[in-house]
């Protein structure tokens, strides 16, 4: 579920990449500071994006500082100074990962569920802290969990219906980045489509493991796929349909993105939104399609 | 937001009129109401459009006074959203004129973002009399809610039931255009990253002129590519 929202590095300027990296480092530091060392291992690109978007929309600019990196003691790294944007992203990161781990414990019936149960031990304390400090995040996630269980139990073949709970949660999380009413509305729609895109790209990424474990996957139901070899042609159809749908969602992401008042770091955001998402999407679909060519 | 017209358009103070015009045209395409349709963001887009228009007008009048009117004014003509709304209303009444008045009511519900109520009203229509308009409205409802994949299906049904309706065709084509990986509405060069032209950089016009060029070259060498010209 994580790591899909990332820039297309070859097209980033070096100074842009430096800023991106320092946000990543700043977030890592802040997570460690607030939620303990282990929480740092759960960091991903998506929350870096959330921080980046957040600091791009605030009036006053945030400062950077050089500080020691816990993973590389020899080198001082430039980090974003700790600020509200960072602590919000850190809280979102913890609570999303907590949700993901709980979801995986339910999903996997084999040895993997024990791995997730083991990880759960580490995240439990941090997520409790988030729930105390950010009540509304807890509400969003509880709602998401209930909605998702309901959606999965319905075994619906509608991609939109199955992605709706994740998308709505992302919309609400994004909405908080601005105090301006009309900008909040745009952010909500932007987050909604971004969440939908992440959910569906994740569904494509997990398609074979879901098929093997007989887990719910809206694409598998929509194209009535039960076996890789027998339904090979249908799987090809599935991938090209998925690509079209994801394209449509990206164009909606872009339409809402263009209405946001971005004050700084616009080029990095442009990179992620206009070409980063598409690049990730292309790679994920290509990787899954290749499996079919081999068989 | 700042009210400095140059900041709104994102141009420097010493930009030439043609540069400003090019930026302005790009922004008008970007915020064009066609791109947003029944999305709940259409009013934000309209606001942005107004801001851009005002900024452009004030720059044009400023430049005019400073250069004794040597520029012949707006050229492109500032885009007014009220004109669009009028034509929108017109197409509404035209397409709903021959069906039951209930559809017009549902349309207005979707337009004002009362989606739950609109869905109830749509569900009330018995299944055997659900026509193209019903599917189109259902599609618009899904679209407003953000269910773009299901919306495509409904728009497709509406278009197939009544391929002659220009509204159904336009919306269906736009969805198909975006599904192919193009951004914005049809004809829009695409969300540009660093000013580069995105997908669809080769327009029909480009292709025709390239063909004509190739034909001319062939004729120079004694051959012929397009026999009729």
Image: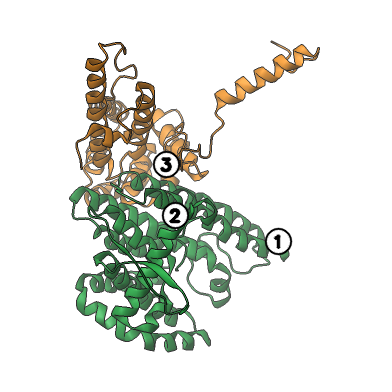
Closest to the observer, B176 or A246? A246
Cα–Cα gap, marks 2 and 3: 45 Å
Q: Nearer the viewer, mark 3 or mark 1?
A: 1
| Shown colour of chain A | green
- Regarding residue B139, the answer to whether it shows in the image is yes
Position of B208 relative to A156 (above/below): above
Q: CA distance from mark 3 to mark 1?
A: 34 Å
Disc 1: host chain: A
Pick the front one: B134 or A183: A183
Q: Residues within 10 Å of mark 2 (few under 14, many from 20)?
A: few
Which residue is disc 2 drawn over? A15
Q: Residues within 10 Å of mark 1 (few under 14, many from 20)?
A: few
Instruction: Report the mark closest to the observer, 2 or 1.
Output: 2
Toward the right, the furthest residue is B222
Both on one chain, marks 2 and 1? yes
What kind of element bears circle 2? helix
Look at the image and tell me whether residue A218 can be seen: no
Q: CA distance from mark 2 to mark 1?
A: 40 Å
Which labelled disc corresponds to residue B155? Answer: 3
**Earlier along the polypeptide chain: callout 2 or callout 1?**
2
Q: Quadrant of the C terminus of chain A?
A: bottom right
User: Looking at the picture, how far across and down is residue A114, in whole percent?
Assistant: 47, 89
Q: Observer-nearest residue: B87 or A267?
A: A267
Query: Is A156 drawn above or below residue B26 in the view shown?
Result: below
The x, y position of residue A218, in whole percent, is 47, 64
The chain containing the residue under callout 2 comes to A
């Amino acid at each position: 579920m994580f790591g899909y929202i990332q820039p297309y590095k070859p097209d980033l300027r070096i100074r842009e990449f430096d800023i991106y990296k320092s946000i990543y480092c700043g977030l890592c530091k802040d997570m460690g500071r607030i939620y303990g060392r282990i929480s740092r291992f759960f960091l991903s690109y998506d929350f870096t994006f959330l921080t980046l978007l957040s600091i791009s929309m605030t009036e006053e600019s945030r400062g950077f500082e050089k500080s020691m990196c816990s993973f590389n003691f020899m080198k001082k790294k430039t980090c974003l100074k700790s600020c509200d944007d960072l602590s919000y992203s850190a809280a979102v990161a913890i609570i999303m990962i907590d949700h993901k781990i709980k979801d995986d414990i339910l999903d996997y019936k084999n040895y993997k569920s024990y791995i997730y149960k083991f990880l759960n031990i580490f995240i439990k304390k941090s997520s409790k802290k988030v729930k105390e400090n950010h009540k509304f995040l807890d509400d969003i996630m509880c709602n998401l969990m209930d909605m998702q269980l309901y959606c999965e139990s319905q075994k619906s073949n509608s991609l939109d219906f199955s992605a709706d709970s994740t998308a709505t949660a992302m919309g609400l999380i994004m909405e908080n980045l601005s105090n301006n009413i009309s900008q909040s509305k745009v952010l909500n729609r932007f987050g909604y489509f971004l969440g939908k895109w992440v959910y569906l790209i994740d569904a494509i990424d997990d398609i074979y493991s879901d098929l093997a474990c007989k887990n719910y996957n809206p694409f598998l139901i929509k194209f009535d796929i039960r076996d890789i070899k027998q339904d090979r042609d249908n799987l090809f159809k599935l991938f090209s349909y998925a690509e079209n749908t994801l394209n449509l969602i990206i164009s909606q992401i872009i339409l809402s993105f263009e209405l946001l008042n971005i004050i700084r770091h616009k080029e990095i955001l442009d990179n992620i939104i206009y070409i980063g998402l598409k690049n990730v999407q292309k790679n994920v679909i290509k990787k899954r399609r290749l499996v079919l060519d081999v068989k | 937001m700042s009210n400095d017209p140059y900041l709104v358009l994102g141009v420097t103070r010493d930009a030439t009129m043609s540069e400003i015009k090019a930026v302005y045209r790009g922004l008008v395409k970007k915020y064009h109401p066609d791109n947003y349709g029944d999305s709940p963001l259409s009013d934000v887009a309209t606001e942005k459009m107004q801001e851009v228009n005002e900024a452009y007008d004030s720059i044009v009048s400023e430049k005019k006074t400073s250069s004794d009117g040597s520029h012949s004014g707006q050229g492109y003509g500032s885009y007014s959203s009220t004109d669009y709304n009028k034509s929108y209303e017109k197409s509404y009444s035209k397409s709903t004129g021959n069906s039951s008045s209930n559809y017009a009511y549902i349309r207005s519900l979707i337009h004002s973002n009362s989606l739950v109520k609109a869905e109830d009203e749509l569900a009330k229509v018995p299944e055997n009399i659900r026509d193209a308009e019903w599917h189109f409205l259902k599609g618009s409802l899904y679209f407003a809610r953000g269910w773009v994949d299901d919306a495509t299906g409904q728009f497709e049904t509406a278009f197939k039931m009544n391929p002659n309706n220009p509204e159904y065709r336009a919306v269906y084509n736009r969805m198909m255009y975006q599904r192919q990986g193009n951004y914005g509405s049809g004809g829009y060069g695409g969300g540009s990253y660093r000013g580069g032209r995105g997908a669809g950089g080769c327009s029909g016009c480009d292709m025709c002129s390239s063909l004509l060029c190739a034909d001319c070259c062939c004729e120079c060498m004694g051959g012929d590519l397009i026999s009729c010209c």
